[in-house]
Amino acid sequence: MQPYKLYQSQYIVDNKEGFVRDLSHSAKSMYQYGIFDTSLKYGSYTQYNIFGVSSPSVHMYHLFQEIRDIARENIPTGKLWIQSWINHHYENELLDWHNHSGSWHGYVAIEPWNTVTEFEDFVVENKVGQIYWGPGGLRHRVVAMDDYPFPDKRITVAFDIMTEADFTGDDILPTHNFGCIPLL
Ligand SMILES: [Fe+2]
């Protein structure tokens, strides 16, 4: 059985231009205020939560609700936290192999252009409004499927979901992941 699920948000399809506008503005603000650092290949994603940065976008409010519902469907009980960031890249900035340490990981294709996300054991074709949900710790990278420059930046919203199990042990002090907030 495949270890992941794909959901399709009609709301994102119907409101893509609004998402692109709001998230582009958010990214620009983060560069302006020094939260985004272009010298960091993977971005400074622990320094913010994209849902905070983009507030009060009603589109992002709606997406937050969709992610919350998907999280509860897949993790029926217990406390959950979310860290969420934006991937905002031209074709020559796509993320090479990496993984994420939370219990669960997902990403939302806002404007993926013609890309796939390759995991070690499967490949996800990206399309507007698709929400990927899977276990954390699976290595993956993003690959463009043609040689043409993107018409504009590729935009996805990615997230890690942490459970209480992620924070057990001797040290349960704040983790310096400044974008991590309670979800459910
Ligand atoms: Fe990733």
Image (spheres, rainbow, N blue to C red):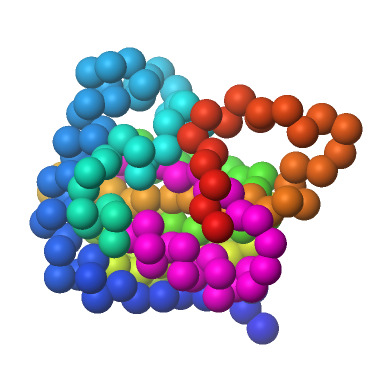
Give the extent of the magenta segment.
63-91
Q: Quadrant of the N terminus?
A: bottom right
The x, y position of residue 64, in whole percent, is: 37, 57
The x, y position of residue 91, in whole percent, is: 29, 43
Q: Residue at x 48, y 50 (%)?
A: 159
| Horizontal side, residue 115 vs residue 171: left or right | left
Can residue 89 be seen here? The reply is no
* Count of numbered tags: 0
Please tell me which residue lies in front, 115 or 22.
22
Q: Residue at x 43, y 31 (%)?
A: 48
| Horizontal side, residue 101 vs residue 28: left or right | right
The x, y position of residue 18, in whole percent, is: 13, 54
Farthest right residue in view? 170
Q: Residue at x 60, y 73 (%)?
A: 74
**Can you say whether 66 is above or below 169 in the image?**
below
Please tell me which residue lies in front, 93 or 50.
50
Q: Residue at x 27, y 22 (%)?
A: 31
